[in-house]
Amino acid sequence: MYSPQLPLARTRVPHYSSSSEAPNADPGGLEASLLQFIHHHHEASLGLREHTEREKKDAIRNAARVSDLLVDAVNGGVQEAFVNQKRIELEIRALAATIARFMKQTDHWLTATHAINTAIKEIGDFENWMKTMEFDCKSVSAAIHNIHQA
């Protein structure tokens, strides 16, 4: 991610105290041109390095922003799913309570209908017993009546 820094070219310019010690150096000569060229190259390299660092920091900042936006987008969906899940769980609990209440009510109704059916059967049995008793009484009455006439 980081580019290695290039070593800077440095030249040593000898310092001569008098012009008699300096080798044939004229101010507009080859050595001055080279020094100027190296200085210009050094400044251009520094400018390019600074520009690259600014662009790198900007790219990192933009990548972090995009990452935050993506995380927010994903978290928004996850949060919505979590809220929906909690709401569904609450409704499930409410439905389970309602089902339990209906089951108790249904059991009470079944008990009541069983009692009614038993009572109806007993009434039917009693009615049948009464018919049998009535027939027996008529038979006994007819027998007594026959005996009395005889």
Image (cartoon, helix red, strand yellow):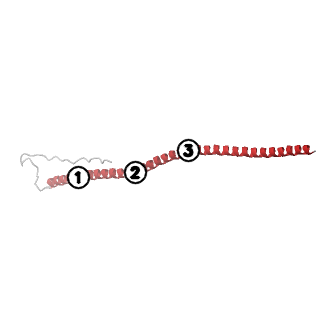
Query: Disc 3 or 2, which lies upstream in sequence?
Result: 2
Q: Residue furthest right?
A: 150
Q: Quadrant of the C terminus?
A: top right
Sequence order check: which comes first, mark 1 or mark 2?
1
Residue 144 is left or right of residue 1, and the answer is: right
Pair 3/2: label in front: 3
**Residue topped by disc 2:** 76
- Whether the residues at callouts 3 and 1 have beta carbons within 8 Å, the answer is no
Residue 1 versus residue 101: which sits nearer the camera?
101
Tag 1 secondary structure: helix
Instruction: Give the residue pinned by disc 1.
Output: 45
Q: Amino acid at mark 2?
A: Gly
Q: Which residue is mark 3?
A: 101
**Could you say where residue 57 lies in the image, as x and y percent from the top left?**
28, 50
Measured as percent of width and height from the top left, residue 83 is found at 43, 48
Q: How far, Cα to Cα, is label 1 from label 2?
A: 46 Å
Q: Residue at x 64, y 43 (%)?
A: 111
Q: Residue at x 79, y 46 (%)?
A: 131
> Nearest the camera: 58 or 66?
66
Which residue is at the front of the view, 67 or 95? 95
For marks 3 and 2, give the CA distance.
Answer: 38 Å
Outermost residue toward the front in this view? 149
Q: Is disc 3 placed on a helix, strand or loop? A: helix
Q: Tell me how far mark 3 sits from mark 1, CA to CA.
A: 83 Å
**Coordinates of residue 2 in the picture (x, y in percent):** 31, 47
**For discs 1 and 2, the disc positioned in front in the rendered view:** 2
Instruction: Tell me the crowding category of disc 3: few under 14, some 14 to 19, or many 20 or more residues within 10 angstroms, Cα based.
Output: few
Vertical order, 31 against 136 (above or below): below
Q: Which mark is residue 12?
A: none
The amino acid type, in three-letter code, at marker 1 is Ser
